[in-house]
Image (cartoon, grey):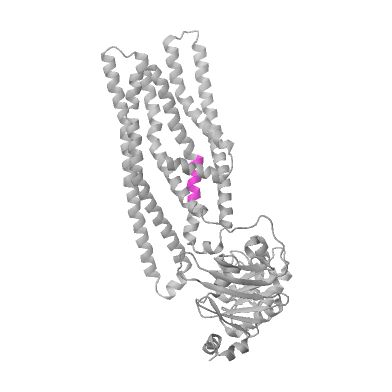
Amino acid sequence: MHRLIEGLRQVVGIADTRSPRLWCGLGLRVLERACAIAPFFLGFVWLQGGTTASLLWLTLGLLGLLAAQLVCSHFGQLNSFLGGYELMHGYRQQLLDHVARLPLGALRQERIGQLGERLTEDVKRIETIFTHVLGELLAALTVPLLFMLVLVWVDWRLTLALLVTLPLAFVLLNRLSGFFLAAARRKQHSFMQAAGLLVEFIAGLRTLRLFNRAGAWRGRLDQQFSEIERHSLGVEVWGGSAIQLYRLCVDISLVLLLLTAGLLANAGQLPVLTWMLFALVAPRLLDPLLDVAAYLSELRGLAQAQGRLQLLLDMPTVEEPLQPVTVQGHDVRFCDVSLRYPEQPEWALRGLNFSVEPGQMLAIVGPSGAGKSSLLHLLARFHDPQQGRIELGGVDVRDMRLEQLYGACSFVFQDVQLFDASVLDNVRLGKPEASLAQVMYVCGQAGCDAFIQRLPQGYDTPIGENGQRLSGGERQRLSIARALLKDAPILLLDEATASVDPLAQYEIQRALSRLAKGRTLIMVAHRLRTVRHADVILVLDQGRIVERGRHAPLLAQGGLYAELWQQQVG
């Protein structure tokens, strides 16, 4: 129970809203349930000493309780729903704001399917609790216990018989719930694993078929679904057992009530009116308690969902200053920078020292796994270095707001991200207010205007999710056009020409050469031919800078750069 209360408290705290409509709705739901039972007590009081003259007041009282029940039911449900949605709106907003401020490197480590499961299904489970379950549970617990106190005043012996098994029922429910929660956690973990595998299967179906591995991957999915089935049975066994034992203990209280009433009646100690009141009211008080077990199971689902979301909320966000700083220029400096990824024993980058002035082109080359992309990711603040500092215009990037940093930079990475929209909308992401003429110009500079014109609707052609209707080279050229349109003073390219044909590569290189004038250009390249005219070439190996200089001197040194050149050129 402590975990349930803590889960509710965390959700309300994260939502950061008072939600008066929710609390008003919960109070009205309790009054609604009370108004449904109060007529029996009102009739009991009247039958004990009421007169014909007071029958009118009894009738008015009963009609008033009926009207109050209808009003409380309508406005209680309305305010519970609206208040719950209001609370969850604040919760979703805070959650998404937190995710938006997470380091991009940390998000890249999450499986898309699992992250989507958290942000949609888990949040939906919590919303259902506040909009539908919490009011029912509160009324089911408080109203019966409140009227039990009134019954103590009527006859404490019958009330004791009615109450005696309830503590045992709650103890059994609480003890067995530990096994139920463990089984539910295993089931949810299996669901999230299956969601991640399913997203990967659908996204990689073309590759799996080409390599004749689709059947093997379906086998992995079938195995995961079998695990879900096994854990689901465990949840039903433990959940069903706990609920049935709880219900049995609650039902036994009716048997004890009947036995006690029989003993008292035989002894002549049970008035008829008292027995009538207990006989009519007891089932109405116990029926809501029978449903409490189901409500508590749903609340435990909230605790588990909130626990999974709390892990996301506990992830540290990118630290940003409250006020933006003044940046002088657009030079980039790495000052003794070292990076080690979480849970990785080896350093990805060690002791990097270099600078790039505006108007210069810096090329980063090296064998696979040398740390080339990691270097760009540091500048983009996907991660922060454990040692050293990265300066932009003389200011540590950690002292800049992300909007300021990303406003100064354009990015073109190996993993192209496009959206299920038109070509025009995807390119305009770099500059939403750009005209069609501006978009067409940068597309021409990036070498993609020709293939766009061949599309059925030209620039208005939808390209599908992540640009799946385009080839790899076409998608890459669109991302380059988007970066060109943004026209930021710093351009970061990660294998930008790796997926384009030689003609498009030549056109892109010409465009990049013009764009680099007066700007800072940093590019990671696998094809060394594309970096021959770079002002500075950094050669990385095992996270360290082993060579630096221009193309011709590096070739003359006969080191790693020359070796890589010979491997490519022959």
Residue 469 visible in rendering: no
Q: Nearer the viewer, residue 211 or 405?
A: 405
Q: Looking at the image, is 344 positioned above or below residue 58? A: below
In the image, what residue occupies the spot 41% across and 23% down? 149
The part of the image, by quadrant, that contains residue 326 is bottom right
Q: Position of residue 393 (x, y in %)?
A: 69, 68
In the image, what residue occupies the spot 38% across and 22% down?
280
Counting labels gives 0
Q: Is residue 71 left or right of residue 39?
A: right
Between residue 528 and residue 471, name the one nearer to us.
528
Observer able to see residue 181: yes
Please say whether residue 127 is one of the residues in the magenta stretch: yes
Q: Which quadrant does the N terminus fall into?
A: top left
Pinpoint residue 119: horizontal percent, then vertical percent.
51, 53
Q: Nearer the viewer, residue 507 or 96?
A: 96
Name above or below for residue 99 compared with residue 492: above
In this rendering, position of residue 395 left or right of residue 130: right
Q: Position of residue 40 (x, y in %)?
A: 43, 20
Q: Is residue 464 above or below residue 94?
A: below
Percent coordinates x, y for residue 58 in the rendering: 49, 15
| Helix, strand or loop for the magenta stretch, by majority | helix
Instruction: Classify residue 170 by image quadrant.
Output: top left
Magenta highlight on residue 298: no
Q: Which residues are magenta?
A: 122-131
